[in-house]
Amino acid sequence: MTLLDRVENALAQKIPPQHRRLLEFVVARPGAFTHEIAKECGIGNVPCRAGELNRRTLHQLGISLEGHRQPGHTNRYGEPNGEYRWQLRER
């Protein structure tokens, strides 16, 4: 079973609307930044929703939504920020 087959299985299940929007967005735009997902999907706390989606749905299908911190990104004060890039991976 391919990664996209597993995503289709996840989307066929009854999942909360924020989880659905998050999953569809990351499939369409792998490597999306946290702020892009938050803005386009209307999600305030992306890591929290990703964790819920993983625990409730994706892990059972053998995939996971992972965020990886991007080194070198700073906020407007020059401090390291918590910006992540998100993508799906097989477990």
Image (tube, helix red, strand yellow):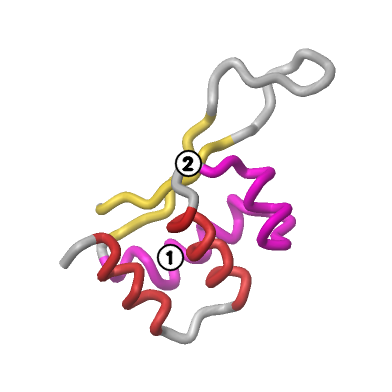
Whole-percent x and y of residue 15? 51, 80
**From the viewer's perspective, is 85 left or right of 83?**
left
What residue range appears in magenta? Answer: 32-61
> Which residue corresponds to mark 2?
31
Whole-percent x and y of residue 39? 73, 53
Q: Is residue 79 above or below residue 22?
A: above
Q: How far is disc 1 from disc 2 in space, using C-alphas? A: 21 Å
Q: Main secondary structure of the magenta part?
A: helix
The question of residue 44 being in magenta is answered with: yes
Q: Residues within 10 Å of mark 1 (few under 14, many from 20)?
A: few
Contact, mark 1 vs mark 2 (Cβ under 8 Å): no
> Which residue corresponds to mark 1?
55
Secondary structure under badge 2? loop
Q: Residues within 10 Å of mark 2 (few under 14, many from 20)?
A: some
The question of residue 49 being in magenta is answered with: yes
**From the viewer's perspective, is 20 left or right of 91?**
right
Whole-percent x and y of residue 88? 38, 52
Whole-percent x and y of residue 20? 53, 72
Q: Residue at 76% of width from left, 23% of height from top?
A: 75
Badge 1 amino acid = Arg
Badge 2 amino acid = Gly
